[in-house]
Image (tube, grey):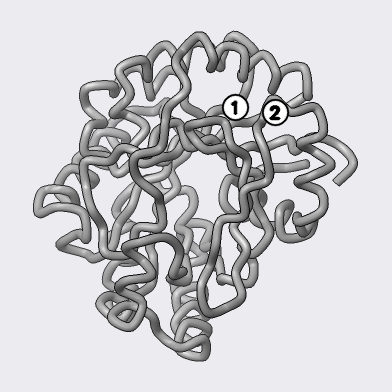
Amino acid sequence: MKQFPEVVTFRITSRCNNDCKYCFGPRNVEEMDFSKLKKLFHLFYERRVKAVVLTGGEPLLRDDFGEILKELKKYSFKIFLDTNGDLFFKSRDLISKYVDIIGLPIDFPDSSYRNEDNIKTVLEILDYYKKIKKHPLIRVGTVVTKDNFRKLNEIGELLKKYPINIWKIYQFTPQNVNAIRNKSLLEISQSEFNRISKSVKDNFSNFFKVGISSRQDRNNAYFFIGSDGIVFIPIDNMDICREKKIGNIFEKDILDKWGKFISEKHYIDNVRLTFNYKF
């Protein structure tokens, strides 16, 4: 790509309050402090970034989460937040005011890989947004595994009760410690993923947008920034997915370095699918 990506994914912390079997995030990564983040967001503005995806870890664990939202909105960025939902209600008003799209996980219709209360909390969030007119667009994500692939229709029936805009179905990807360790326990075949994905899309596309995200679609598809400022891109050989570190976000030639690895088509398709984003 010849220009800086319009949508960047920023892992603002590697800390998390859960330890999911399929987690692909690293732990114990240094975090930039707020003064460094202000410089980063100004850099985004100078490079004409339009939207910032806040992910983790769990973004709401940062004590300066509210200040981060406010600083981003100073530049009129669209804010996309991926959260497990556990800490949502302590920041509910900030999220409802500043966030444009919120991403929430649902693994099963009645339980979660995260903790025993997570599904209850996520449904409480959806109930809250069901009662108010103005709220962020809502994207629910489900990682398909051996444990839940037979329950996707039940999840879809559950989602029909709520103001869901996008349901994104992810193919499980063995990336980083937990996901690689549990690969044999969680991974289903490509043909099985294709079959169940088609069934879900056929059954629920009349109710909300259903996005199917295969491993191949996500390969070489991101502009990821770690909490320490290191830009990386997931590269998947269809056995194991590795994070290729490219350089520091403040390096002047970081775009050229990223351009050597990115699939522009995969990047654009992934952003459109995940966030309903229009270039």
For label 2, the crowd category at 10 Å Cα-Cα, with few meaning under 14, some 14 to 19 and many 20 or more, is: some
- Disc 2 to disc 1: CB gap under 8 Å: yes
Residue 87's x, y, as percent? 22, 32
Q: Which residue is mark 2?
A: 50
Q: Is residue 105 above or below residue 134?
A: below
Residue 79's x, y, as percent? 54, 28
Q: Residue at position x 47%, y 71% from top?
A: 171
The reply to whether residue 149 is visible in this rendering is yes
Q: Nearer the viewer, residue 266 or 161?
A: 266
The reply to whether residue 150 is visible in this rendering is no
Q: Residue at position x 63%, y 40% from top?
A: 231
Residue 200's x, y, as percent? 45, 75
Q: Where is the C terminus found, in terms of image quarters?
A: top right
Q: Earlier in the sequence, mark 2 or mark 1?
A: 2
* Res. 104 mark: none
Residue 161's x, y, as percent? 29, 54
Q: Say which quarter of the image contains residue 7.
A: top right
Q: Residue at position x 15%, y 62% from top?
A: 110
Residue 57 shown left or right of residue 215 in the figure: left
Q: Nearer the viewer, residue 128 or 250?
A: 250
How many numbered marks, from 0 up?
Answer: 2
Amino acid type, mark 1: Lys
Q: Say which quarter of the image contains residue 229.
A: top right
Amino acid type, mark 2: Lys
The CA distance from mark 2 to mark 1 is 6 Å
* Res. 78 mark: 1
Residue 263 shown left or right of residue 53 in the figure: right
